[in-house]
Image: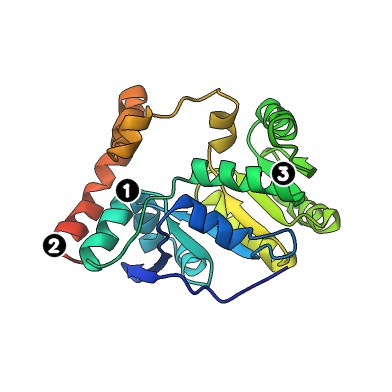
């Protein structure tokens, strides 16, 4: 296990630290270079919505500023980094893609993985697909329907499993709050919040076409498919104001 100091370029957006990576491959190599050097800590996908939420959620703000590996999941964050730091070489690291890259590497290196979150049927399908597709050693799983009273026993099960990678699909900020508690009880693993990634992996939810992703329009595709997201998207105008006024 390793908790190596992060030496890759780091930036700040709205006083929130974020680490920039030139490619998905570089990030994966950093996190899982080999079976004996899994980087321990908390991976946190950073987007504009999460930064705005942290402005009024003190606990989330504390988590985002307490030494986790915040990476630019949202295209808005990438554009803000490029504006504030013109010489930076930063690419968007979509959480769903990073998770698959880590799972493939975990399978190749036989790194034990624990899955948390989502619906029971989705979790079961994701587990089976990971085993079949990449031979990922899944050492435990728990769907997202557990109570507050069950949290500590779940943390103890994760610890007892000796998992080195723990991924949590419960949505933000719930998954970040759970990961923080789990990390405090068992710091010897790499934790990652993955939102709806399990659903995407098994094909239950469809991502935007690749061209839309490359153009940074995945948010628009989601809005077209789910008009109910409009209220959430309108709130992001506040972040766009920060960006254009240079208040980053």
Q: Is residue 128 above or below residue 1?
A: above
Q: Which mark is residue 83?
A: none
For label 1, count other residues whose C-alpha is less than 10 Å away and answer few (under 14), some (14-19) or many (20+).
Answer: many
- Numbered disc in front, either 3 or 2: 3
Label pair 2/1, CB-CB below 8 angstroms: no
Q: Is residue 116 above or below residue 51?
A: above
For label 3, count other residues whose C-alpha is less than 10 Å away and answer few (under 14), some (14-19) or many (20+).
Answer: some
At a point 78% along the width and 54% down the height, the residue shown is: 158
State the SS at label 3. Answer: helix
Q: Is residue 247 left or right of residue 175?
A: left
Q: Which mark is residue 245?
A: 2
Label pair 1/3, CB-CB below 8 angstroms: no
Between 37 and 175, the one nearer to me in the picture: 37
- Numbered disc in front, either 2 or 1: 1
Q: Circle 1 is placed at which residue position?
A: 75
Q: Residue 40 in the image: state x and y as whole percent.
A: 65, 65
- Numbered disc in front, either 1 or 3: 3
At a point 40% along the width and 71% down the height, the residue shown is: 10
Rounded to the nearest whole Å, what is the CA distance between mark 3 and mark 2? Answer: 45 Å
Q: Quadrant of the C terminus?
A: bottom left
Comes first in the chain, label 2 or label 1: 1
Q: Which mark is residue 107?
A: 3
State the SS at label 1. Answer: helix
Q: Is residue 147 visible?
A: no
Q: Residue 45 in the image: state x and y as whole percent.
A: 47, 53
Q: Is residue 248 above or below residue 123?
A: below
Q: Residue 204 in the image: state x and y as whole percent.
A: 55, 23
Comes first in the chain, label 1 or label 3: 1
Label pair 3/2, CB-CB below 8 angstroms: no
Across the whole image, how many numbered discs are drawn on residues? 3
């Amino acid at each position: 296990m390793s908790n190596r100091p992060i030496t890759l370029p780091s930036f700040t957006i709205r006083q929130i630290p974020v680490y920039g990576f030139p490619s998905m491959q570089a990030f994966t190599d950093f996190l899982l270079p080999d079976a004996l050097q899994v980087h321990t800590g908390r991976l946190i996908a950073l987007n504009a919505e999460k930064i705005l939420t942290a402005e009024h959620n003190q606990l989330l703000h504390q988590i985002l500023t307490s030494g986790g590996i915040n990476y630019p999941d949202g295209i808005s964050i990438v554009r803000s980094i490029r504006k504030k730091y013109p010489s930076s070489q930063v690419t968007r690291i979509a959480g769903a893609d990073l998770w698959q890259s880590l799972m493939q590497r975990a399978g190749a290196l036989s790194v034990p993985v624990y899955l948390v979150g989502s619906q029971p049927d989705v979790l079961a399908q994701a587990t089976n697909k990971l085993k079949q597709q990449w031979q990922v050693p899944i050492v435990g799983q728990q769907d997202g329907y557990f109570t507050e009273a069950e949290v500590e026993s779940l943390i103890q099960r994760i610890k007892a499993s000796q998992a080195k990678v723990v991924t949590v699909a419960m949505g933000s900020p719930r998954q970040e709050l759970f990961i923080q508690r789990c990390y405090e009880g068992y710091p010897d693993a790499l934790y990652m919040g993955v939102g709806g990634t399990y659903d995407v992996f098994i094909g239950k939810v469809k991502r935007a076409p690749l061209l839309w992703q490359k153009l940074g329009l995945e948010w628009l595709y989601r809005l077209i498919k789910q008009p109910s997201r409009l209220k959430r998207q309108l709130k992001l105008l506040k972040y766009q104001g920060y960006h254009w006024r240079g208040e980053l």
